[in-house]
Image: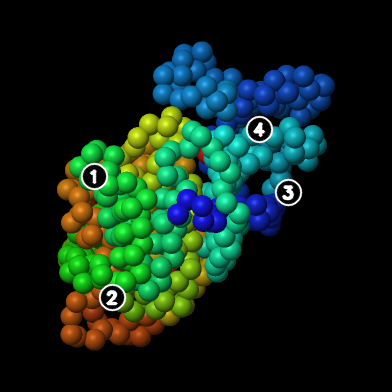
Amino acid sequence: MSTNPQIRPTYADSFRCIGSACEDTCCQGWTVPVDRATFEKYQSLPESPLRVLINASVVRKSPCAAQAADATRLAEDIDSTFAAIRMNDANECPMFTEDRLCGIQAQLGESLLSHACQTYPRIVHSRDGVEEKALTLSCPEAARLVLLTPDFLATPSEPAPHANSLPTDFWPIRSVVLKVVRARSYPLWHRMFLLDLLCRRLDSIASGELQRGVPAVLADFESAISTGTLRPALEKLPVNVSAQLDIVLRLAGLMLHKSNVRPRFVECIQAFTAGIGNGPGATLETLAANYARAYDHCCAPFFDRHPHIMENFLINTIVRCQFPFGKEGMLTGRQTNKTREFALLAAQFTLMRGLLIGVAGFHGAAFNQEQVVHTVQAASKHFEHHPEFLSMAHALLVESGMDNARGLAIMLRSAELKTAEKVLVCGEATPAIPERSVPARPDERSAWPPPGGRRPAPQGTARPV
């Protein structure tokens, strides 16, 4: 299997920034790190108004902070966050010009940008000459490229270069993972649960519980998928829409006190909550019923017509998070718990799909690709860049008892409406769903969080490194 051509994603190379035409900006709302090499370049710039602005705005991290980082990061990570740009009162980079462009790039060229600014929204993983790139979907143009490009991994590349220190069986495992994600003969939630089964098998091999080699297990797994022998068991997995929605709501609320809440994210959340009928008198049961209707009548038909969208979201997340090995495992070479890595992938998928279900319920028959991009981009910018999100999401799953196979099945299973009564929604009048109104302006946050929740206290959000 390891001699077969490997699908090595190259879609990130196609990204091109659209500059001032972008509906959002990467120069506002988060910390902009400056690497050591770029900081030293700034120290040698000739005197100019821009040099004065840079000197006043680029702040070197204190030795104490560097020492603290040294305890948890590799030296290369410390160098990449050697300094940071202090945001102005509008929480914008002071280099951001009135024409919505970077003053440093305009006056000094791209070579004087920090590494983070040069590479964003690309996430670059490099090890022993093997480089992979994903895109962070917090950039609207990156979200469009990833989500809306059909078959963007259609062509296998040449065999992967040899790298001794890559995790054992990296390429065969990666190949099977991507095949599973794109196996459209199975519903997408089936494919997600198959990845869970694969990760549990691989962990059993690593722990010595399963006395078989990885190649043999991968071959058996591919055979089972192609023959469909796992389908009957998958169809018997539990359905609990209320529990699924509860996890979506709790995941969506994790960063309200830790992340900078931007207007685009508020718009997304307000559409989501309106789409599931949140309001006075709403209960989890009534919300779950509306959530299931929104899925059945608004969300599922759209994604049936555009099956590549959520597949591409998953593939990008797999590459970005280096699933199922994890960033830490790839950096250190240590064996990681692949079942835990799947739980993190499942949490991200469940949250994003849940938000899209609510947004689809709000827009009804008008739900379209533009609204998908808006939702995914706004949510990615809110959650993806916060360094604590994944660990907090995993802690939530453990606390809720949803980190086991049964709990993950409940999270992943499609939220079908299990009733014989036909309910008309998506643009057609129905007494079963509360009347919906246009979401409030971003500064009117009454629609979120749900009753009993607490409102956000925005703080800074880290930019990717």
**Residue 33 in view (yes/no):** yes
Across and down, in percent, residue 13 comes to 65, 52
Residue at x-position 60% and y-position 37%: 129
Q: CA distance from mark 3 to mark 4?
A: 21 Å
In terms of sequence position, does the residue under pointer 4 or pointer 2 come before the other?
4
Q: Amino acid at mark 2?
A: Arg
Q: CA distance from mark 2 to mark 3?
A: 44 Å
Q: CA distance from mark 3 to mark 1?
A: 62 Å
Q: Residue under circle 3?
A: 99
Splitting the image into 4 quarters, where does residue 226 fall? bottom left
In terms of sequence position, does the residue under pointer 3 or pointer 1 come before the other?
3
In terms of sequence position, does the residue under pointer 1 or pointer 2 come before the other?
1
Answer above or below: position of 172 versus 270: above
Which label lies toward us, 3 or 1? 1
Q: Residue under circle 4?
A: 114
Which label lies toward us, 1 or 4? 1
Label 3 sits on a secondary structure element that is: loop
Side of 171 relative to 427 (left or right): right
Q: Residues within 10 Å of mark 1 (few under 14, many from 20)?
A: few
Q: CA distance from mark 1 to mark 4?
A: 49 Å
Q: Amino acid at mark 4?
A: Ser
Q: Residue under circle 2?
A: 293
Q: Residue under circle 1?
A: 211
Label 1 sits on a secondary structure element that is: loop
